[in-house]
Image: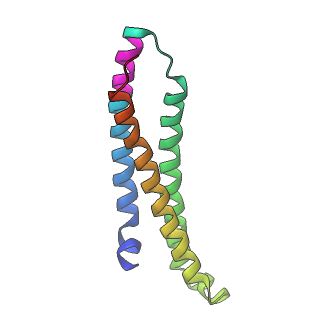
């Protein structure tokens, strides 16, 4: 758990960078397809925008959870505060990985697009 506490924000920022780069690659390819075929990718573009927003919100959530985890005031309120915050922190990490996986799948889908 110490590794996650110490490095989660760095991991979140790295995942955001990877997701943004992935979106850039996919959106470039989509632009080519739109110009060639006139395909409509409005929902896909919106999904990438939402994915980036979600990743930023997950980073903010991780910061807030880390503050709560390291707060002596919250720790004194209940003996279960630390395990609760640790579970939340792990959940945020897994949500971020899920977001990354979803964006990575988009690369393979768009590369194989025959439209």
Magenta stretch, overall SS:
helix
Work out which residue is located at the far right of the displayed protein and give it. 77
Residue at x 51%, y 17% (from the top left corner): 40
54 within the magenta span: no
> Which quadrant of the structure image shows residue 68?
bottom right
Residue at x 50%, y 62% (from the top left corner): 92
- Note whether 54 is above or below 49 in the view shown: below
The N terminus lies in quadrant: bottom left
The C terminus lies in quadrant: top left
Residue at x 39%, y 27% (from the top left corner): 27
Q: Which residues are magenta?
A: 27-35
Nearest the camera: 111 or 65?
A: 111
Residue at x 52%, y 44% (from the top left corner): 53
Residue 21, given in percent of the width and then of the height, sits at: 33, 39
Q: Give the colour scheme shown.
A: rainbow
- Note whether 43 is above or below 80 in the view shown: above
Nearest the camera: 77 or 54?
A: 54
- Position of 14 with respect to 48 (left or right) is left
Residue 55, given in percent of the width and then of the height, sits at: 48, 50
- Note whether 65 is above or below 14 in the view shown: below
Residue 14, given in percent of the width and then of the height, sits at: 33, 53
- Note whether 26 is above or below 38 in the view shown: below
30 within the magenta span: yes
Q: How many marks?
A: 0
Residue 64, given in percent of the width and then of the height, sits at: 54, 66
- Position of 81 with respect to 98 (left or right) is right
């Amino acid at each position: 758990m110490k590794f996650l506490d110490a490095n989660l924000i760095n991991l979140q920022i790295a995942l955001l960078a990877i997701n943004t780069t992935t979106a850039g690659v996919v959106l470039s390819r989509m632009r080519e397809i739109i110009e060639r075929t006139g395909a409509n990718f409005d929902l896909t573009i919106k999904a990438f925008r939402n994915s980036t927003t979600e990743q930023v919100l997950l980073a903010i959530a991780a910061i807030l959870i880390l503050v709560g985890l390291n707060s002596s005031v919250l720790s004194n309120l209940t003996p279960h505060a630390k395990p609760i915050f640790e579970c939340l922190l792990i959940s945020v990490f897994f949500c971020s990985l899920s977001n990354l996986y979803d964006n990575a799948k988009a690369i393979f889908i768009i590369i194989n697009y025959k439209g």
